[in-house]
Amino acid sequence: MADLGSTLLTLARNSIASHFGLAGMPVADLTELHEPGAVFVTLTQRDNLRGCIGSLEAWRPLIKDVQENALAAAFRDPRFEPLSLDELPITRVEVSLLTPAKPMSFTSEADALAQLRPDIDGVIFTAGNRRSTFLPQVWEQLSDPAMFMAHLKQKAGLPADYWGPNVQLERYQVKKWKED
């Protein structure tokens, strides 16, 4: 039986390759691919971020979510120029399959920070119409919960010290697979 992780990685790479008119590798037709799924596709080059786009909620079949987010990470991440064909061989693909997000209950920012589980939780920060997320992998760069939260607020376009009664937090976990 084909491994889900290697299938998702192949699907993501095939989507990007097809944009350049290149043929892809064969992919197993797993039942899970046709069920709703939410993934983030992260692209790196020499361990540096090159694109990352994803879905926070499972709203379309997993196969479509992987394909569309791979294309978006490669060609529509506003932080980067679109990926070029010359970059494809040095680009590594990572796919993170998200669990459904669960709302957190907290009485203060300190209480919320105490509940976070570094290296386990991905976090969705919402305040009014501002929203941001960090995958659990971001804990590798921001291992302190206060620093993690400060950067999450800044990603949402708010000051690092922002806190208010409208703050909502959700957490999720991921299964992730990365090309060698």
Image: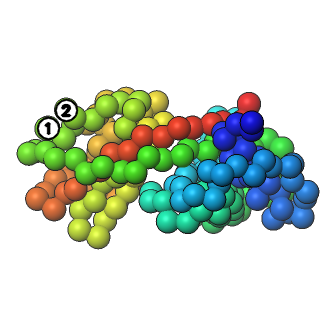
Whole-percent x and y of residue 113?
21, 37
* Residue 164 image label: none
Q: Which residue is located at x 61 percent, y 45 percent?
A: 95
Write down the quadrant of residue 94 in the picture.
Answer: top right
Asked if the residue under mark 1 is in contact with the one under mark 2, i.e. CB atoms within 8 Å, the reply is yes
Whole-percent x and y of residue 22?
90, 58
Give the answer, above or below, for where 31 lies relative to 92: below
Q: Residues within 10 Å of mark 2 (few under 14, many from 20)?
A: few
Q: Which residue is located at x 55 percent, y 44 percent?
A: 96
Whole-percent x and y of residue 77?
59, 61
Q: Nearer the viewer, residue 82 or 5?
A: 5
Q: Which residue is located at x 30 percent, y 49 percent?
A: 102
Numbered disc 1: secondary structure:
helix
* Residue 114 image label: 2
* 8 left or right of 24 in image: left
Give the answer, above or below, for where 97 lies relative to 80: above
Q: Which residue is located at x 48 percent, y 47 percent?
A: 98
Q: What distance separates the C-alpha of mark 2 from that of mark 1? A: 6 Å
* 101 left or right of 104 in image: right
Furthest residue toward left: 107
Q: Nearer the viewer, residue 106 or 73?
A: 106
Furthest residue toward bottom: 129
Residue 50 in sight here: no
Residue 10 in sight here: yes
Give the answer, above or below, for where 46 lies relative to 150: above
- Going by the numbered disc 2, the residue's amino acid type is Ala
Whole-percent x and y of residue 36?
54, 59
* 117 left or right of 137 in image: left
* Residue 110 image label: 1
